Amino acid sequence: MVTDSNIAQQVPRTANLSGRLGVGSIVFMVIAAAAPLTVIGGNVPLAIGEGNGAGAPMGFIIAAVVLLVFSVGFVTMAPHVKEAGAFYAYISAGLGNRLGKGAAFTALVSYTAIQLGVYGYLGWAVNDAVRRIGGPELPWWGYALLALLVVAFLGYRHIELSAKVLGVALILEIAVVVVMDAAIFLHGGAAGISAESFTPEAVFSGPLGVAVLFALTGFIGFEATAVFRDEARNPARTIPRATYLAVLIIGVFYALSCWAIIEGVSPSQAVAVAQQTLNGEANMLLDTAETYTGVVVRDVMNVLLLSSLFACVLSFHNVIARYQFVLSRKGQLPGALGKSHPVHHSPAISSIVQSGTALLILAIFAVLGLDPLVGVFSAMAGVSTVGMVLLMLLTSVAILVFFNRRSTPRLAARWKTTVAPVLAVLGLAVSLWLVIQNFTLVTAASVGVSVILGIIPVLALAVGWIIGHRGKREVPENSA
């Protein structure tokens, strides 16, 4: 059995994480965590079929606008937050350490949940792809385990190795969707290109809130730009630029691709095709790609869907490991988790523990015989969505409180320190209400099970707040 003292003797300790990540590298990792191809193939049919049909692109636009407004205060406060803790560090600075530590536990639960959900999706997708080419049908968890081992290796190494892997995967998956989008628009779609998706009739033809909900789940992880501040080349400039770019690129990509797919099947048939996809009778993304670009592109897209899912779990692994690293240095987790590797300058021990945690929970899911899509992916996505929207709401409140304690800002700065955060609070409060109101659609579970899942992030917040006073040991920023 490995104890804290054993690890302390085995792994020499260095002061902090290090790296020279630029804007591009950080944006790559953040967008990879959003798994754009996975969202186009999964969230888009859900937003169309369960939401407002042909008006679904507006859901992604609304979500992007809300997060852009949130980002104004987020990046304005960035120079005042010297820790790579993202939501945890912001909430601590504005609302106190105890609530901040509760937020850190909520973040750990939320990121772990979505990572586990994507492992389930990845295992199912790989098995489905293998069966389609005539291979044997194997348990989903076997493929998930193989992916976990590769993630564990990359997560242990220097962050720039992960950035390169994620960058290649991201470029390829975005490229293949752009090819499909361009082909649809060049061919004129199924019934001519129109702006019907953006008319009031289409936007309000069904529950717009459902489209916004599934759009928000597609942005999970964008705030991770701040998690990498210790490994950024110039945090004061890199983090704000990376944050804005990540939200803009993700938002435009989602909205444009959603619109393209709707035009590809025609606005009048979009709901029917989306519902066939949800029933397992079709695949809205792959079928549309084949119609406009051929079988080869469809097959390439299917392979890239797998790389998208892998890139997603790798990104979340890196974020979770760093949250644990920060919590350890604040005295809330075992001290060994706060030690960086002497060569790779990575949170190596934290990375190993994160891999072990994921392995243990996946083993439990496998023993319980849970369905990888409904029992694992949908349920874990629900937990994560509640947690992340709650964290963003608390962060916006923290930004308001933080700047309100300072001298009255210049009129030109009030937009960043007061107006934008207030608007973000309002937008995120409505978003959280939409998530809760439509929660069973995310979890694909009963009301009782959904309530239990939805409470998990709140319980994590409460537990973190309760034990927050125990943080007596804190590693100084420049300790050796």
Image (cartoon, rainbow, N blue to C red):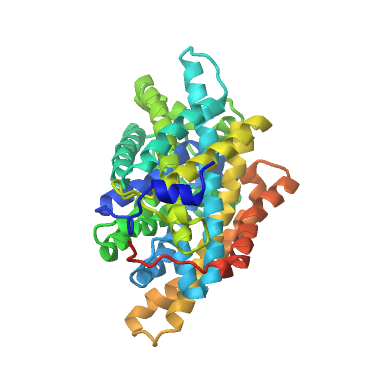
The C terminus appears in which quarter of the rendering? bottom left
* Above or below 264: residue 56: below
Instruction: Let me know if residue 254 appears in the view.
Output: no
Q: How many marks?
A: 0
Occupied quadrant, residue 286: top left
The N terminus appears in which quarter of the rendering? top right
Q: Nearer the viewer, residue 101 or 69?
A: 101
Residue drawn at x 57%, y 23% is: 139
Q: Position of residue 142 (x, y in %)?
A: 53, 25
Instruction: Let me know if residue 284 appears in the view.
Output: yes
Q: Nearer the viewer, residue 191 or 102?
A: 102
Q: Position of residue 93 (x, y in %)?
A: 45, 73
Residue drawn at x 58%, y 63% is: 430
Q: Nearer the viewer, residue 191 or 288?
A: 288
Q: Position of residue 141 (x, y in %)?
A: 55, 28
Occupied quadrant, residue 235: bottom left
* Above or below 472: residue 308: above
Q: Nearer the viewer, residue 80 or 130?
A: 80
Residue found at the far right of this picture:
448
Residue drawn at x 60%, y 66% is: 465
Q: Position of residue 90 (x, y in %)?
A: 45, 68
* Above or below 73: residue 254: above
73 left or right of 460 in image: left
Residue found at the far bottom of this picture:
407
